[in-house]
């Protein structure tokens, strides 16, 4: 009495694409450490262009949960950022805060 022919029921031999799996309640995929993926052994503090990616817009070092780095590389990254700041390759504070004296986000 159904509208489907006898040999083609839904459960038998239907060539459908598999559904994508749901990731549970939060749905985010875990971030992987880009230094581990690229097999980086030493993080170079003399490359400010690469290190600038790991600073926030206010000049702070981004946390592990945001970057996705492992603990070992996060420690090495923070040490490299501090060395680059000490040698004046990277700023301690962003330019707009140095010029105006205050940040617009805390008013």
Image: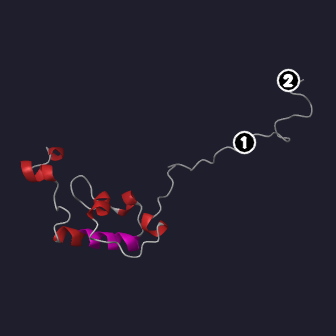
Q: Residue at x 53, y 48 (%)?
A: 25
1 or 2: mark nearer the eye: 1
Residue 5 placement: quadrant: top right
Q: Is residue 3 above or below residue 44?
A: above
Tell me if I can see residue 81 in this picture.
yes
Q: Residue at x 18, y 45 (%)?
A: 105
- Circle 2 — which element? loop
Circles 1 and 2: CB distance less than 8 Å? no
> Which residue is identified by label 1?
17
> Which residue is identified by label 2?
3
Q: Is residue 15 magenta?
A: no
Q: Answer with mark 1 or mark 2, whichever residue precedes in sequence.
A: 2
Within 10 Å of disc 1 (Cα), the crowding (few <14, some 14-19, many 20+) is few
Rendering coords of residue 44 (x, y %):
32, 72
Q: Residue at x 82, y 39 (%)?
A: 14
Residue 74 placement: quadrant: bottom left
- Provide the residue span drawn in magenta: 71-81
> What is the magenta segment's predominant secondary structure?
helix
Residue 34 placement: quadrant: bottom left
- Residue sitting nearer the eye, 29 or 43: 43
Q: Quadrant of the C terminus?
A: top left
- Residue sitting nearer the eye, 90 or 22: 90
- Callout count: 2
Q: Say whether residue 61 is left or right of residue 31.
A: left
- Circle 1 — which element? loop
């Amino acid at each position: 009495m159904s509208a489907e022919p006898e040999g083609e029921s839904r459960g038998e031999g239907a060539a459908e694409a598999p559904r994508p799996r749901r990731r549970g309640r939060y749905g985010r995929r875990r971030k992987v450490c880009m230094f581990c993926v690229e097999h980086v052994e030493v993080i170079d503090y003399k490359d400010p262009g690469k290190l600038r990616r790991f600073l926030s817009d206010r000049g702070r070092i981004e946390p592990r949960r945001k970057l996705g780095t492992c603990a070992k590389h996060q420690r090495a990254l923070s040490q490299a950022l501090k060395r680059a700041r000490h040698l004046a390759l990277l700023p301690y504070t962003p330019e707009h805060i140095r010029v105006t004296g205050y940040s617009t986000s805390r008013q």
